Image (spheres, coloured by chain):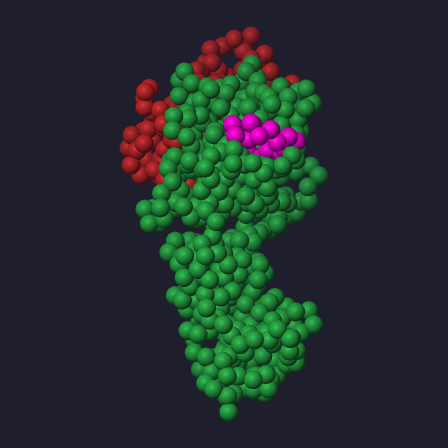
Chain colours: A red, B green
Amino acid sequence: MTADKERLDRAIIAMRVARELPPGATVNLGIGIPTLVSMFVADDSIVFYHSESGVLNCGPLAEDGNEDIDLINAGGQFLEPVPGMAYFSSVDAFAMIRGGHVDVTILGAHQVSATGDLANWMLPDRGVGNIGGAMDLAAGAEKVIVAMEHNDRNGNPKVVQECSFPLTGKGCVSLVVTDVAVMEPTPDGMALREVAPGWSPDDVQSVTGARLIIPDTVAEYEV
Amino acid sequence: MPPAKLDAEAMARRAAGFIAPGDVVAVDTGLPSLIPGVTPPELGAWFLRNDGMLNNLPLSLADAAAITRGGYVNLAIVNAAQVDAAGSFAGTVSAANPDRQPPANSVDLAAGSGRVIAMLSHTDDQGRPNIVEALSSPADGLRCVNAIITDIAVIEVNGGGLALSEVAPGWSVDDVRAQTDADLSIPPALREMDFSLPANAPPSKVYPDGPSAIADVPDGATVFIDGFGGPGGMAHYLLISLRDRGSRDLTIVSNTAGIARVVSFGTPPGRTAIDHSVLIENGQVAKAIASFPVSPSVSRPSEFELAYRRGEVDLELVPQGTLAERLRAGGAGIHAFYTPTGAGTLIAEGKESRNIDGRDYILEYGLRADFAIIRAHKADTNGNLVYRGTSRNFNAVMAPAARVTVVEVDEIVEAVQLDLEEVVTPGVFVQRIVKRPDGFTGYE
């Protein structure tokens, strides 16, 4: 069974996503795999991190023992104070997002549809969920990249023809990076761009809920 | 032959006599700009100028306009060229520049202020009356002027027209009428202008403790609770005070509905933070309006989630940026706005939506509250606030949108001790200040 083929680990997904960040970009990282992306941005590629907690140009996380409750990111992690940070209110934080000042956001997802609909705030089984800044990022960021595992814990595909979970935004996702493939939602459907080492396009299709558009050549995942 | 007309400073002194202690007074350019210079500082007035200065505190023009439209201006004093019998006024015109100048913010002032006073010379350069039956140029404000101060009279505007309430020293009713092109009624209380100024101080904003600062939060109140979710920027002492007061049936508006107690969000290792849960487990909350209401961990549900599952509390889920903007709008006198966030999702259900320039938007309404309990690092006795780091996100946005904003601070200083360049929340948005007791940690 193809789903048993070896999948890439979370760090490799993050490493692949990091290649999508142009130097000088203002970037917002969601919780989970997206948080790992900052570890893989090349030292000579300056990227400005934005967080909904009201801080721009976040540096690294604080070391143990240096926690300051007045210096957190949107995931509630403690930040190291670094020169060049700016603090602001939630109104300004979201003016940056909705106003088109955040170039790229990297988000986790429960489902992404073939045309780029995003569902990432509620699992229907729980009956209640957290939206946080996700809907604003989906609506406002210039580019939305989803970084996630290709299938959920039960093996269900997360790349689907139509989302069955409540949406975060319609047609907002421009790139999906998973542990088996890189895909691009298009108006015509989900286009396969890259596959993980050892995976064929058919292997990827077999674990995907959306009908993939498979071009003549599909590159191997580059990291 | 009547005596000389009043000079500009005397007019400014008369205008200053209308200011009550602690009033926010919007002063236009021209004659009104002289008022701050003649007003006793003890009165504690906040003068908002057209250029965005609030006393000596520099504001953006958006924030200055928010103060005006948000209903914080008790008294607006506009520089008028003409006022008519219905209390409409037209802005500055001069002989050298007969075209009307842009109305600057006098249109906002006219729309948003408690009481509007127009100042102007009673007649123009050629001796023609400026108080007229009908304006000769378009109005900056329609039927908004409550009183007129000129260089020979004070005139009250009421529904029935203009009433002469004061005359300058030595001026008779007939002298004033001769220079006025509108009917003036003469009430029995007509008197000569008095230039004495009040100098009583406004009541102190500093309260002795938390319980006294929130003692009048009624059952059914809407209360803004600040912070992002972790203990940073959360008014723990006021939360405990509100729990002890026991007000019930509250609607709380906050980014989370209390998650810090059950997860490590923003909390140093080994600590358990006081959060909204203290109100929820005490049965005080009927509804939460929040963007991140429940624990990110399904296996560690918060008090709110448990109460929600029992059907004891309602939830209105709002995207975080929409929550921030709804608060901003509420505080800035903007009733509603269109946002793209949430279009095509569950959030849009039941809301008016509109396609603008090819994109879908949904209509969201401003939020206001009876009380806000917020935390800041430092306050001066006027209520100007300084925050630390990321502990300003929702705090700074909530302060303007509540009728009564109560702030909990580490330190209260005299006004002269605060660096005004660091002030984020101007004191006009803060009604009560409490110092967090020494040794109070915010942890359980």
Asked if residue B254 lies in the magenta stretch, the reply is yes
Looking at the picture, how far across and down is residue A200, in whole percent? 50, 17
Q: Which residues are magenta?
A: B239-255
Picture quarter containing residue B164? bottom right
From where the camera sits, is residue A166 visible?
no
Seen in the image, is B415 located left or right of residue A132?
left
Front residue of B107/A168: it is B107
Please determine whether, in this image, residue B407 is positioned above or below residue B106. above
Asked if residue A124 lies in the magenta stretch, the reply is no
Front residue of A57/A195: it is A57
Looking at the picture, how far across and down is residue B204, in whole percent? 45, 47
Front residue of B264/B56: it is B56
Please determine whether, in this image, residue B48 is positioned above or below residue B301. below
Counting labels gives: 0
From where the camera sits, is residue B130 visible?
yes
- Please give the name of the residue rendered at 70% of the width and 72% of the height, measured from the top-left corner: B160
Looking at the picture, how far across and down is residue B316, in whole percent? 64, 33
- Please give the name of the residue rendered at 50% of the width and 83% of the height, measured from the top-left corner: B170
- Please give the name of the residue rendered at 43% of the width and 46% of the height, measured from the top-left corner: B383
Looking at the picture, how far across and down is residue B327, in whole percent? 55, 43
Seen in the image, is A170 located left or right of residue A95?
right
- Please give the name of the residue rendered at 58% of the width and 38% of the height, measured from the top-left corner: B216
